[in-house]
Amino acid sequence: MSPETRPGLYRGFVLHDRVRPATNRFKYGAYMVYLPLSGMDEAAAGARLFSHNHGNLFSVWDQDHGPRDGSPLRPWIDALLDEAGVDLDGGEVCLLTIPPVLGARFYPISVWYCYHSDGTCRAALVEVHNTFRQHHNYLLHERGAPLDWKSKPKVRKVFHVSPFIPLDAEYNFTFGEPGERLFVWIDDVVEGSHLLLAGMDLRRHDLADGPLTRTFLRLGPMSVRALILIHWQAVKLALKRVGFYRTPEPPAEETTL
């Protein structure tokens, strides 16, 4: 089966479900774009409302991802994969991310799906941003072997995201292979037991002016929406007297391999 490498608009919902020390659950509509690194300009040419490295209603900017200096993204991810012992043999890499709307930027999570030329996914890079203008990457891989979509990769949490969750924790990831449906779930494990389930469940639409227009009219600018809702949930947690953790220094290494 060939991997999904066509540009797309994925729309659905984001869910957070916290179980302790106070329960807190919320679900809201969300959308992201899914773009092959080799075809971003072609994707932009197919929709008047979407641009690559240019201002528009919807856009994606190289300077917001990877090396964050505006340089091409493929050499950067290839270098990381090489360091981790992962060879794609020229296969495609696709970026799933929130598109800035009218220049408004905020990326709670972006995922890079790294496909081998034989169609198997060999790695997933998870970019995480917090609300303190910091970021970190987690590279999930099996040292070059194909990733099992049914597996649940685990990593130690090294980057502070929420002031209501300690840094001493573990992430358990669950991925669904991108296709007509796409999902990512993250189980936040603290002190050996489940604390929070966070993730998204999205359905594919064409990256075209019609779906983009309907998405904007229904959900507005996703970056602004996500930032407002994150702060609103923080207020609710504070009112529930959930413990607050100060922001530590980010890890010295930008990527956990």
Image (cartoon, rainbow, N blue to C red):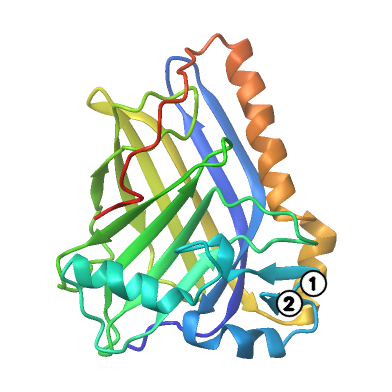
Which three-letter amino acid code belongs to the residue tagged 1? Asn
Is residue 5 placed above or below 250 in the rendered structure? Answer: below
- In three-dimensional space, the C-alpha distance between marks 1 and 2, rounded to whole angstroms, equals 6 Å
Q: First in sequence: mark 1 or mark 2?
A: 2
Label 2: which secondary element: strand
Q: Is residue 203 visible?
A: no
- The residue nearer to you, when weighing 144 against 233, is 144
Q: Give the structural element (helix, strand or loop) at label 1.
A: loop
Task: Please report the residue visible at 57 percent of the width from the left and 65 percent of the height from the top.
Answer: 63
Whether residues under marks 1 and 2 lie with C-beta atoms below 8 angstroms apart, the answer is yes
Give, as a three-letter code, the residue at label 2. Answer: Phe
The answer, for residue 189, to whether it is visible in the render is yes
| Quadrant of residue 30 within the rendered picture | bottom right
In the image, 13: left or right of 179?
A: right
* Residue 61 left/right relative to 198: right
- Which label sits on residue 50? 2
Residue depicted at x 30% and y 58%: 139
**x, y percent for residue 158:** 31, 37
Say which mark, if any, is on residue 185.
none
* Percent x, y of residue 95: 49, 70
Q: Which residue is mark 1?
A: 56
Q: Is residue 2 left or right of residue 211?
A: left
The quarter of the image holding the N terminus is bottom left
